[in-house]
Amino acid sequence: MYNAKVRNYQKEALKTRVAGADRYEIIQMLMAGALEKMVLGKVAIEKKHFEAKAEHISKASAIIEALRASLDFEVGGEVTENLYALYSYMLDRLVDATMKNDASIVDEVSGLLKEIKSAWDAIPVDVRMETLNQQSSESSYG
């Protein structure tokens, strides 16, 4: 009963956070969520809880797939192409981790995503706002 109430509270808090977030913050939340699911997946592999492993790795994969699908090739150029390839590699490696029950592969993917996230987190707020304002202007005139 208590856990259900806590989960409901967490879901509502997340909905509120997402509702007030800009695109950069949503990407940050997605990356953090994928990292969290990979940690849980790794622990499940180590404890031989294979059903939990499958659930957590599957959710991490779905988040990485969503990140890959959100890439804008018209704006990002070579960086976007490289990110697409890296996300694709990460998805393939998570399949390998699931098939082999290999926590070290999960660590590898987590390390890659942490690097991407740290670069994303380092984008200055003023640059974020300028980009968001440009995109808003373009979409209202386009």
Image (tube, grey):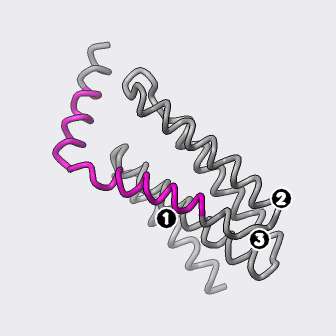
- Could you tell me residue 49's position as x and y percent? 81, 77
Judge left or right: residue 53 versus residue 80: right
Q: Main secondary structure of the magenta part?
A: helix
Residue at the spot 61% in from the left edge and 43% down from the top edge: 65
- Report the mark closest to the observer, 3 or 2: 2
Q: Which of the two residues, 136 or 68, is positioned nearer the viewer here? A: 68
Disc 3 marks which residue?
52
Is 16 placed above or below 65 here? below
Q: Amino acid at mark 3?
A: Ala
Judge left or right: residue 125 versus residue 40: left
Disc 1 marks which residue?
12
Residue at the spot 58% in from the left edge and 79% down from the top edge: 5
Q: Earlier in the sequence, mark 2 or mark 1?
A: 1
Residue density around tag 2, few if under 14, some if 14–19, many if 20 or more, within 10 Å: few
Q: Earlier in the sequence, mark 1 or mark 3?
A: 1
| Range drawn in magenta | 108-136
Q: Amino acid at mark 2?
A: Met
Q: Amino acid at mark 1?
A: Glu
- Quick one: which residue is furthest to the top in this view? 142
Q: Quadrant of residue 117?
A: bottom left
**Do the CB atoms of the residues marked 2 and 1 lie less than 8 Å apart?**
no
Disc 2 marks which residue?
99
- Could you tell me residue 118's position as x and y percent? 37, 57
**Which mark is drawn over residue 4?**
none
Q: Is residue 51 magenta?
A: no
Give the CA separation, mark 2 to mark 1. 34 Å
Q: Which of the two residues, 52 or 116, is positioned nearer the viewer here? A: 116
Residue density around tag 1, few if under 14, some if 14–19, many if 20 or more, within 10 Å: few
Give the CA separation, mark 3 to mark 2. 14 Å
